[in-house]
Amino acid sequence: MKGRNGISPGPLRKSALLINPWIHDFAAYDYWLQPLGLLYLASFLRSNGLEVNLINCLDPFHPAMKMVSKAPQRYAAGHGKFFQREIEKPRPLKGIPRKYKRYGISPELFRQELKSVPSPSVILVTSMMTYWYTGVAETIRIAREVHPGVPVILGGNYATLCNDHASSNSGADFVIAGEAENSLQDVLEIAGAAPRYLPDGDDLDSLPYPAFDLLGSPAQVPIQSSRGCPFRCVYCASPVLNRKFRRRDPIKVADEIQFWSSRGLRNFSIYDDAFLVKPEEMAMPLMKEVIARGIACRFHCPNGLHLRGISGETALLMKRSGFETLRFGFETSELQRQIATGGKVRGEDLLAAVGHLKSAGYKDREIGVYLLCGLPGQPASEIRASIDFVKSCGARPILAEFSPIPGTFLWDECRKNSQFDLDEPLFHNNTLLPCAGEDLSMEFYRDLKRLSRI
């Protein structure tokens, strides 16, 4: 944890204000996003006797916003658009001919929410994409204006991946890298509270459930069955964000799903990096338990599932237990790049998985396959060939614009190949295709997007 301006821990007041900040970007869509780490932290703090309040700047259902802005389009499954307002582009992005927006509630409403909360002992702000940091900085600036003198702690992905940058540019007093429970004792000290309970991050089943009640009535909740990943793909930040690969007991995961289901929730998202890796250890026993208990739910997997985990039995269990939104990581059909980026899957794995999924009753459009677009040194022809290959397998290709991530094995190559100065996190933005070669123009990219639609 890094301190700023010599700020000392706050007085002995046992309360914490947690904030999920705005997104500043050219485009943003809610694919089952929830601030899961922040909500786990809320439960840890409650277990230590703190009163906890939450302000969700991304709340798409805030009733006060509906009085001043058109309600964003949302879907029953729990995904959809955010409230949005066009804002001035940051100076490094001035030359990009696209509108730039703040996604979430209005600053006026945010100030009202801040004023409604008694002055807390500590303010904790999370962060997601590195290139969303201006939204984080704006959130912290306003929070400090309304609650001057209260220590502000920043954690999350941006704080971990760009720790020095966050310490200098976020406006936070303290910047935490890594998993929240590892710094809980420091957070309690800053809040002026003596620790009663320190979680064991190696035993994920020992952790209290995330404090989803702070979200009011969420349309969906994420379920975490594991952290980390046993693979070491060169473009992925999982090894940086997670100390090691850990799994829960699938029966305990089923217990949690049943707990939330008994409270009226039907939609669950799974963002785990390795849910289908060795499916006999987690996915299959979990799905069998959901079926045996008769839990009526729908699962959405916006992160890339592991293709090699799909067998005839796995596919049938997924269909019977309610897996609706399927996304798989394939990245490219080019063999040498498959090997160079981690060797996780091959073309024959995709073909076999699609066959099993279709036999289980899934349609072409329901089988989404991610293809990375804009990797360093990747020719446009490779992307086109990958789209054609996925279609020939009977699945739906989905282009995933590559974003360079500090700390990954590919980072140095990204810096060498990018036309942008990647020390500025705004240039990590995947909208810019920051590491794409000269033959992947924006016009050609738009053609590829059209080609990928089925």
Image: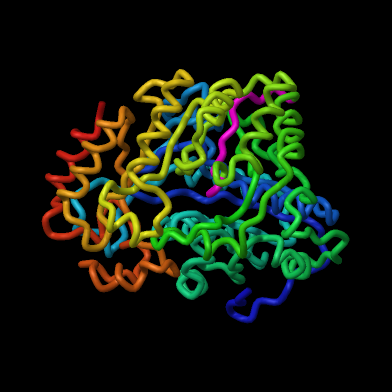
Measured as percent of width and height from the top left, residue 100 is found at 30, 48
Quadrant of the rendering where the C terminus is positioned: top left
Q: Is residue 351 left or right of residue 326?
A: left
**Is residue 142 visible from the viewing direction of this image?**
no
Front residue of this view, candidates 443 and 203: 203
Q: Is the magenta stretch mostly helix, strand or loop?
A: loop
Query: At x 36% / y 60%, what residue is drawn?
Result: 341
Q: Does the magenta stretch include residue 267?
A: yes
Of the pair 344 and 323, the residue shown nearer to us: 344
Where in the figure is residue 140, as x and y percent of width and height? Answer: 54, 60
- State the residue in front, 251 or 64: 251
Quadrant position of the N terminus in the picture? bottom right
- The residue furthest bottom is 6
The picture places residue 143, in percent across and down from the top left corner, at 58, 57
Q: Nearer the viewer, residue 383 or 340?
A: 340
Q: Does the image show residue 412?
A: yes
Residue plotted at (63% across, 81% down):
6
Number of marks in picture: 0
Would residue 296 be found to the left or right of residue 339 on screen?
right
Above or below 173: residue 343:
above
Give the colour scheme shown.
rainbow
Q: In this view, does 143 lie above or below 316?
A: below
Where is residue 27, by image quadrant? top left
**Residue 391 shown left or right of residue 35 in the figure:** left
Range shown magenta: 263-274
- Residue at screen point 77% across, 55% down: 45
Percent of width and height locating residue 281: 66, 43
In the displayed structure, 407 sits above or below 231; it is: below
Q: Does the magenta stretch include residue 313?
A: no
Q: Which residue is drawn at 32% across and 31% down?
A: 396
